[in-house]
Amino acid sequence: MAAPLAFAALPLYVLFPQFYATNLGVSLAALGGLLLVVRALDAVTDPLIGRLLDTHLRSNNLMPMAVVAALVLLLGFGALFKAQSDWGTTPLLVWAGLMLTLCTGAYSVLTLALQTWVSRVHASAAQQGELQRYLIAWREGFGLLGVLVGASLPAVAGLDATTATLMALMVMALAAWYWVRPALAMSNANSLAATTPSVTPATVSESAPDPATTAPSLSGATATDAVVNTSGFFKQLMLIHVVNGMASAIPATLVLFFVRDRLQAPAGSEALFLLLYFAAAGLAMPLWQSTMARIGLVKTWGIAMVLATAAFAVTASLGSGDSIWFAVVCVGSGMALGADLCVPQAMLAQWLNAPNAHAKSDTLPRKDGVYFGWWNVVSKGNLALAAGVALPLLGVLGYVPGAPDNTQALAWVYGALPCVLKVTAAGLLWHCWIKKRSRAHT
């Protein structure tokens, strides 16, 4: 399911503005305003969709909802690019707004359904975390494959072939999901009390730490790895997610400017660099999976932050003609992206299966969908915030797109600012969990 979702995302947000501006004559200002409204609506509805999914999960009625959402996404995607230039600007904008709203809403339903399903896949206490890490790594790996195909197919085969491919991928994904669900039992209990293993007094030593204050296990991938049984864990994870996500979103926003103006690379080089970046992320998934199994989630994420910082630090010194070095940077930062995609979501999924994660009372319903809804709000907000911070900052520093006179400012914002944010995220990771765990062992 991750592959067709990622496959659809790039044409929706990248190809759509170019198609409507070039082929249909809609102004960029109007398209920009429309996308701003649609994305804002898309972000704020995620927690509501998550709450709806929680209800369907409790009634074991997830698959019909996923099928309906897939049909809506396919219909909206195909109709979006069937608009005609003789409709006029206002009808075109109304049509695009309606179709984009349908597509993004259906996309959010499917994305949250997949995330919450993984968090509720039920196994023994010893295997729960390992199974979730495995599923998340494969999910994000297929997502990266979808990104690579979605980025190249529209230009090679055209929009009709892209729509047909999306339809085929979606049908295969739904069939595979329907087939694999019975093999992976899902915890459909209405409360955590039904899924939390019972603990007898004989299994708890007198010196055992208070579960409400236990920090995550960092020495290996144990059943409680990266789980903090307090509500404060989610707030800490979200804070790190914001800072770390901003560090990745800023280069994503500025990469085309950097390649063209700073590196002055040949036309078409952007596609090669993006291919290296996403391919490195996908190929690094098995490495991060084995690292998580050996040293745990938190330390793995910290290593990835260090790798990303080292890669971004190099970019500040790159200039015209340094395309080969930038390719190395794309590989290094892409590998770090692989960990960013799977580690924090694995941490959240494990916490959602911990006692007291959802409410003070174990009898209250699980709220996996709501938590992942807020998680996705932050993920989408990072991209908007990155553009809102980086682009005005470049203007203040005197950078003008297309003018090679003041590209050093571009290099600092593209490379140095993400380094500061990555170091900050790593510091928060250390302060919130690693340092506390080290003190607990002394």
Image (cartoon, rainbow, N blue to C red):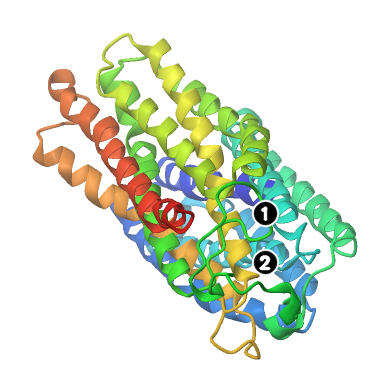
Residue at left 59%, top 39%? Answer: 147
Q: Nearer the viewer, mark 1 or mark 2?
A: 1
How many other residues sit within 10 Å of disc 1, few (<14), some (14-19) or many (≥20)? many
Quick check: 267 above or below 212? Answer: above
Amino acid carrying label 2: it is Ala
Q: Earlier in the sequence, mark 1 or mark 2?
A: 2
Residue 268 x/y as whole percent: 45, 20
Q: Position of residue 329 (x, y in %)?
A: 42, 22
Residue at horizontal 72%, vertical 48%? Answer: 134
Nearest the camera: 11 or 283? 283
Mark carried by residue 222:
1
Which residue bears the numbered disc 2?
113
Q: Are marks 1 and 2 in contact (CB under 8 Å)?
A: no
Q: Which of the 4 image quarters holds residue 193?
A: bottom right
- Residue situated in front as seen by the camera: 96 or 91: 96
The answer to whether residue 256 is left or right of residue 395 is right
On screen, residue 98 versus residue 366, left or right, reads: left
Q: Is residue 158 above or below residue 176?
A: above
Kind of residue at badge 1: Thr
Q: Is residue 398 above or below residue 89?
A: above
